[in-house]
Image (cartoon, rainbow, N blue to C red):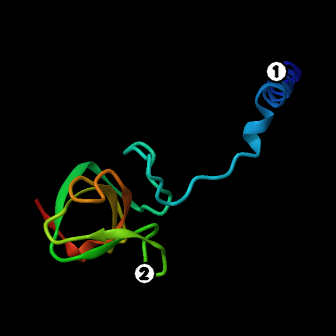
Amino acid sequence: MKIATRIVGAAASTALLIGGAMVAAPTASAAPQSASASALPRACDWEWAWPQKESMTTAVNLRSGPGTTYTSLGMLYKGVRFTEYCNKKFQWSYGKVTSGPNAGRWGWVKSSYLWPA
């Protein structure tokens, strides 16, 4: 038990000496622009086993979070492709825009405006 305590203490001290500045780093936003499928937001409560290829049925806002109170990150027009990685209560989908002016951006879209591509 004493050895484990000493190891943990030494590791914590070393981490503080070497990477102490990392402790004060700001947290990531709900919809990071450089996210990957392996870094899904905590707001997701369902994650697809494989990404779902979708397209917009009408013009919608790409949002920074799952709801209309979140900031719009841009407009997605009818026919724009979107790859869904996870969703919130099957009402909001999180993923990456794969075509159009906002291609490459990650964010949330109301699920009812998506159609399988």
Quarter residue 46 falls in: bottom left
Q: Residue at (43%, 71%) from the top-left corner?
A: 66
Q: Residue furthest top?
A: 3
- Near-viewer residue (40 or 29): 29
Quarter residue 95 falls in: bottom left
Res. 13 in view:
yes
Q: Quadrant of the C terminus?
A: bottom left
Tell me: residue 58, above or below residue 99.
below
> Crowding near pointer 1: few (<14 within 10 Å), some, many (20+)?
few
Residue under pointer 2:
68
> Crowding near pointer 2: few (<14 within 10 Å), some, many (20+)?
some
Q: Residue at (27%, 72%) from the top-left corner?
A: 111
Horizontal and vertical percent position of residue 15: 78, 28
Residue under pointer 1:
7
Check disc 2 and report its element: helix, strand or loop: loop
Q: Residue furthest left?
A: 117
The image's mark for residue 64 is: none
Check disc 1 and report its element: helix, strand or loop: helix
